Structures are given as C-alpha cells and as structure tokens.
Image: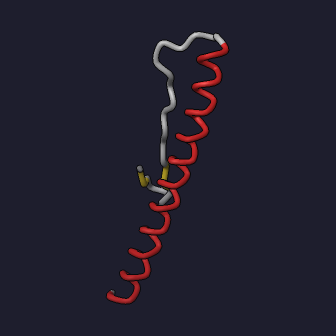
C-alpha cells in the first residue's frame, strides 16, 4: 500500500499466471483461481480500510 501526497491509497495485486497456454484446462483453472484471488484482494482491501478507520478514530480521541 502506498500513500502519496494526495493521501490516496493504492493496493496492487498482480495476477500473472506462470506458463499459461490458451487451452481449455488452463482457462478453467485460471478463471477459478483469479476469482479466488480477486476475493482475497478485495478482503485485504476491506481489512486495510477498516484498520485505517480504527487508527484515525484512535488518533482523533488521543490527540
């Protein structure tokens, strides 16, 4: 995660298959794999946002 001058956060996820070929077996496998990894990335993003919210709330109370 990166927070730049504009206070915008960036979460990057790279989903590059290794040794991919355009056969039906690879298409099926990676389609399911990317659905899972996309959900995991979305969950990580939600956890980061929740943590940032908790930190911000704590900082406003303490200081």
Judge by depth and name the residue closer to the eye, 4 or 55.
55
Q: Position of residue 25 (x, y in %)?
A: 62, 16
Q: Is 4 on the left or on the right of 26, as rendered?
A: left
Query: What is the x, y in percent for residue 5?
Result: 44, 55
Residue ranking furthest to the right: 24
Residue at 57% in and 47% down: 39
Question: Which of the pair 26/53 is nearer the observer?
Answer: 26
Q: Is residue 29 left or right of residue 2?
A: right
Instruction: Name the residue at 48% across, 12% down.
Output: 19
Q: How many marks?
A: 0
Q: Is residue 44 above or below residue 17?
A: below
Relative vertical location of residue 46 with respect to residue 10 in this rendering, above or below: below
From the top left corner, tell me how far across and down residue 7 is, in percent.
Answer: 48, 60
Quadrant the C terminus occupies:
bottom left
From this view, report whether residue 8 is shown above or below residue 50. Answer: above
Q: Which of the pair 37/46 is nearer the observer?
A: 37
59 relative to 48 in the view: left or right: left
In the displayed orientation, state which residue is furthest to the bottom. Answer: 61
Q: Quadrant of residue 28?
A: top right
Q: Residue at x 38, y 89 (%)?
A: 61
Coloring applied to the structure: secondary structure
Residue pushed farthest left?
62
């Amino acid at each position: 995660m990166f927070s730049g001058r504009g206070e915008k956060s960036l979460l990057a996820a790279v989903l590059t298959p290794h040794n991919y070929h355009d056969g039906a077996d690879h298409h099926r496998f990676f389609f399911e794999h990317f659905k899972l990894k996309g959900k995991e990335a979305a969950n990580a993003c939600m956890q980061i946002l929740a943590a940032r919210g908790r930190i911000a709330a704590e900082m406003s109370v303490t200081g």
